[in-house]
Amino acid sequence: MEVSAQGPTPVEEETKPGKTRIYFVDYLRGALVSLVILHHTAITYGGSGSFYYTEPATDPVASLVLTLLTNFNQAWFLGAFFLLSAYFTPGSFDRKGAKLFIKDRLIRLFIPLAVFFFVINPLTIYIAFYHMTAAQLVQQGITAPMGLNLTFISQSVGTGPLWFVELLLIFEFGYVIWRLATRNRATKEARSFPSYLKIAAFILVLAAAAYALRIVVPLNAQVLGFPSLFDLPQYLSFFIVGTVAARGDWLRKMPDMMAKRLFEIVLVASATLLILAIIGTEVTSLGWGSLVGYGSFSSAIYALWDSTFAVGMTMFAISFFRKRFNSPGRLWSFAAKNFYAAYFLQATVIVTCSALVLYQVHIESLLKFGLAAVIIVPSTWGLAYLVRKIPYVERIL
């Protein structure tokens, strides 16, 4: 199983008119950004997936543990980011209108994307490539000094983890087109929270769509610069659900008991469907085919598992943070202001710490992952805080 580098997205910081601020959303976004940092750090030290700088795992157990971490993350947290982003989109459009809404999105999304593309990504690539050992370069498919230089030139500009922001920008523009095309008809209709039956139907449709797409776009296939387009059905559907949920105030109205029950289903699915998908691959006598796609039976089981996991974990996370983290405070203020900047900077912090600081630390991969996490997570948030002190940066990040 493999996953690709991921990242979160910025969301509108304003609440709906007449509503109090949804404090738990800011806490949840902060937690998800920290999870993204851990996700990329896990890939760096042996988890499956692609990232700027990687070191091979010291043993199979470490590789398995870190790969499981990245795969469980992959299954749900991007959908959660899209849903949270979309939740504030209708209210923002209503207040600003199409022109101001587009202007705001260009400032908040396009400018950071362009800066990362032309500045941050080349810097991160340089730090990673020119501090790799010969063995690491071979692992990256680079076998000669000229190959290193050519690879650096070819990869120096790119969106990196901000491909997620790029896709969000596309979705946001799509929302604008839909609002203008429909002339806002039925946009203010508030729908009640869906029943168990509707949620189950959503999961099945999502799984079928993911399975169908992975026939031609298997897991980890790079398409048009997007490293995980195989999960496009999840990204798009969660974004749409977020816009619908905003009208019905679903984040506050979702029943806690329903979230608890779905989390229990997630645990059962992980203990059954995920294991069946793994043991049923072509490496066993069952011969169900690769779980990464190509229309195999294992791929169908895996698609059902990760769709169930995405819905269940997202609902559980919302319920958990709503109950336990729904009041203002210093931690809330810090997370609300700096989560986007932390995401924007996290790849460079991870690579710098791993390639320049910890590269000579020779310990078991899981221990090194833990050491790196203790250093990288607070360093990323601290740097985000400092960078936002630069004039005009806080308007963008």
Image: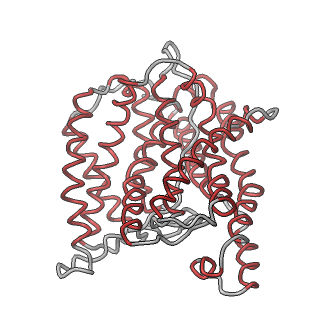
Residue 292, percent across and down? 36, 70
Work out whether residue 175 or residue 216 is closer to the camera in this orientation and state it.
216
Residue 368, percent across and down? 51, 59
Residue at image location 69% in from the left, 50% down from the top = 113
- The outermost residue toward the top is 18
- The outermost residue toward the right is 391
- The image quadrant that residue 341 belongs to is top right
201 lies above or below 56: above
Residue at image location 38% in from the left, 32% down from the top = 318
Q: How many marks?
A: 0
Residue at image location 21% in from the left, 59% down from the top = 273
Q: In the picture provided, is 15 more to the left or to the right than 389?
A: left
Residue at image location 22% in from the left, 80% down from the top = 284
- The outermost residue toward the bottom is 144
User: What's the colour scheme?
Assistant: secondary structure
Residue 314, percent across and down? 36, 40
**Dividing the image into 4 quarters, which one contains the N terminus?**
bottom left
Residue 106, percent across and down? 70, 41
- The image quadrant that residue 331 belongs to is top right
Work out whether residue 90 or residue 389 is closer to the camera in this orientation and state it.
389
Q: In the picture provided, is 116 more to the left or to the right than 31?
A: right
329 lies above or below 362: above
Q: In the picture provided, is 100 more to the left or to the right than 77?
A: right
299 lies above or below 273: below
**Dividing the image into 4 quarters, which one contains the C terminus?**
top right
